[in-house]
Amino acid sequence: MNLSHVFLARQRIAPFVRRTPLVHSPGLSAQTGVHVRLKLESLQVSNSFKARGAFNVAAARLERHAGQPAQEDLLVTASAGNHGRALAHAAARLGVRLVVFTPANAPRAKLDHIARHGADLRAVAPTYEDAERMAKEYASRSRVTYISPYSHPDVIAGAATVALEIIEDWPSVETIIVPVGGGGLISGIAVAARAVSPDIEVLGVEADASPAFFTSLAAGCITEVDVRPTIADGLAGNMDPDTITFDLVKRFVTRVLLVPERSIEEAVRALVSLDHVIAEGAGAVGVAALLEGAKTRGRNVAVVISGSNIDTGRLAALIGTSG
């Protein structure tokens, strides 16, 4: 993937997604000593950045396979929730049939929307890794296309459009902080940002309950980790051993940081109290890293708030907790 693919993705998805705001956070800036702006993908279509990759992969597939038999219009994916919701939305808009495998305990805020968009929801897997395995097996048996939520060039190119918007809206940005799950978002942002402005620092943030990239980068190869429960459920799980994102992260990302659960919870609360922004745990880890004292190379720091699909009961409980 290169910058031309990102510009093509932006053109392809423009009718379907929002150009989300990049807003200054006076409260976080005062607390952290840097100028913080929040890239609010929490306000994106389907309430997460995943809409960008979902619409790009679905639209690109229709372009490439125009005139193919109807069976070719069936896609299969695995998701912790946000990708499934976004791809279900894209499939409904573009007339593509979709089967989505998710963990059985994925948040209702995500599962209900997948079903509402008309996708065939299979919320039966014990873990995300099981959902990915089941989706691949189903696609192989049915001879249809499996779409990875992160390890697909069109998904990554769609996610990379976030970087274009940040740099266009804030040419003096020096550091971009990005949540890391399977690595699709940070791969796209890092490739695009470095192509436009090679001096930009790109920091990734994982929950320390699921340190897949942190551990694998230290080992020099993809390494399986023990995944513990985390409020950042959208980031939880091991990488596909064949993912294309690991090499992209290794090449273009400055470093990957870990944040504990208490800091993620505090970040969700801080976003509500300081900026009136709702974020799910996965969407708030960049703020958690800043609250933990993450050192940045520059003082102009953009933090990607990647999604807001949090169950209302969990959000209420977090807001009601003093810490």
Image: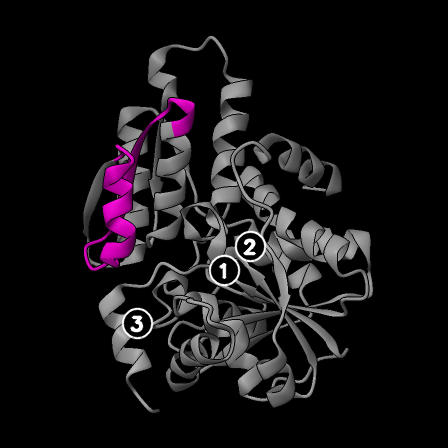
Q: Quadrant of residue 292?
A: bottom right
Query: Can you say whether 79 is above or below 77 in the image?
Result: below
**Residue 36 spot, x, y in % from top left:** 65, 75
Q: Amino acid at mark 1?
A: Ser
Which corner quadrant holds the N terminus?
A: top right
Tell me the element at label 1. Answer: loop
User: Dots 1 and 3: beta carbons under 8 Å?
Assistant: no
Numbered disc 2: secondary structure = helix
Residue at disc 3, secondary structure: helix
Dot placed on the residue nearer the N-terminal end, 2 or 1? 2
Amino acid type, mark 2: Leu
Disc ID at residue 29? none
Q: CA distance from mark 1 to mark 3?
A: 16 Å
- The Cα–Cα distance between marks 2 and 1, rounded to whole angstroms, is 9 Å
Residue drawn 25% across the image and 49% down it: 111
Span of residues in magenta: 93-119
User: Where residue 14 sits: x, y (%)?
Assistant: 60, 35
Label placed on residue 185: 2
Q: Which residue is mark 3?
A: 315
Above or below residue 258? Residue 73 is: above
Q: Say whether disc 1 or disc 3 marks the residue closer to the N-terminus.
A: 1
Res 294 seen here: yes
Q: Which residue is mark 1?
A: 306
